[in-house]
Image (cartoon, helix red, strand yellow):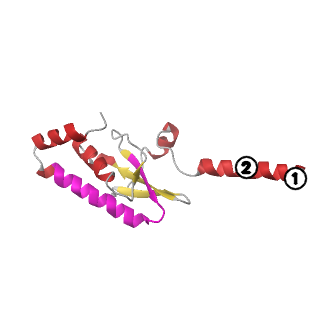
């Protein structure tokens, strides 16, 4: 009986430790410190981390120079069924997303690149008045 209890305790402890290692926490300052000077090597989105269930991607938000661009992009991300935003701080230069492991890295990166292109198209083709009006209706990050 003692062996079963000891084995159960060890198994529980091992599973707890493993569960803590899975995933990421973009709200943790010590975690963010590791990625604050991440080298994107010219890419907008990079697959950084994988777990058994998810792919974690870091996006170079410094590519967006205006609040309109950042918010427009984030709103586009909510329309995709392949992406989950796990980092809503649009003021940062790096923003985290995750996707289900069933989508491979290149497929998800392509989704991000297409959304970036749509964002820049809107940013360059809309007037300042149109952008301002859109922000009044869609800015959830006030």
Q: Are marks 2 and 1 in contact (CB under 8 Å)?
A: no
Q: Residue at x 31, y 48 (%)?
A: 74
Q: Quadrant of residue 79?
A: bottom left
**In this image, 34 relative to 124: left or right?**
right
Disc tally is 2
**In this image, 101 relative to 116: left or right?**
right
Q: Quadrant of residue 66?
A: top left
Q: Residue at x 36, y 61 (%)?
A: 109
Q: Residue at x 28, y 57 (%)?
A: 115
Does the magenta run of residues contain 104?
yes
Q: Which residue is mark 2?
A: 12
Q: Position of residue 75 (x, y in %)?
A: 29, 48
Does the magenta run of residues contain 132?
no
| Most distant residue in the top direction | 142
| Most distant residue in the right direction | 1
Q: Badge 2 local density, few (<14 within 10 Å), some, or many (20+)?
A: few
Q: Earlier in the sequence, mark 2 or mark 1?
A: 1
Residues 1 and 18: in front is: 1
Residues 33 and 7: in front is: 7
Q: Residue at x 33, y 61 (%)?
A: 111
Q: SS class of the residue under badge 1?
A: helix
Structural distance between the alpha carbons of marks 2 and 1: 14 Å
Q: Position of residue 120 (x, y in %)?
A: 20, 53
Could you tell me what secondary structure mostly forms the magenta stretch?
Answer: helix
Q: Position of residue 70 (x, y in %)?
A: 28, 45
**In this image, 30 relative to 47: left or right?**
right
Residues 97 and 60: in front is: 97
Q: Which residue is mark 1?
A: 3
Q: Give the magenta range.
A: 95-123
């Amino acid at each position: 009986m003692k062996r079963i209890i000891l084995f159960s305790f060890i198994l529980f402890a091992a599973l707890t430790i493993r569960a803590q290692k899975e995933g990421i926490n973009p709200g943790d300052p010590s975690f963010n410190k590791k990625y604050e000077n991440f080298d994107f090597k010219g890419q907008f989105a990079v697959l950084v981390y994988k777990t058994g269930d998810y792919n974690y991607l870091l996006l170079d938000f410094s590519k967006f120079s205006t609040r309109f661009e950042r918010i427009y992009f984030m709103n586009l991300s909510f329309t995709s069924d392949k992406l989950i935003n796990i980092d809503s701080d649009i003021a940062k230069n790096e923003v985290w997303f995750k996707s289900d492991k069933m989508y491979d890295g290149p497929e998800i990166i392509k989704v991000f690149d297409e959304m970036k292109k749509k964002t820049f198209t809107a940013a360059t083709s809309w007037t300042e008045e149109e952008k301002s009006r859109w922000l009044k209706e869609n800015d959830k990050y006030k």
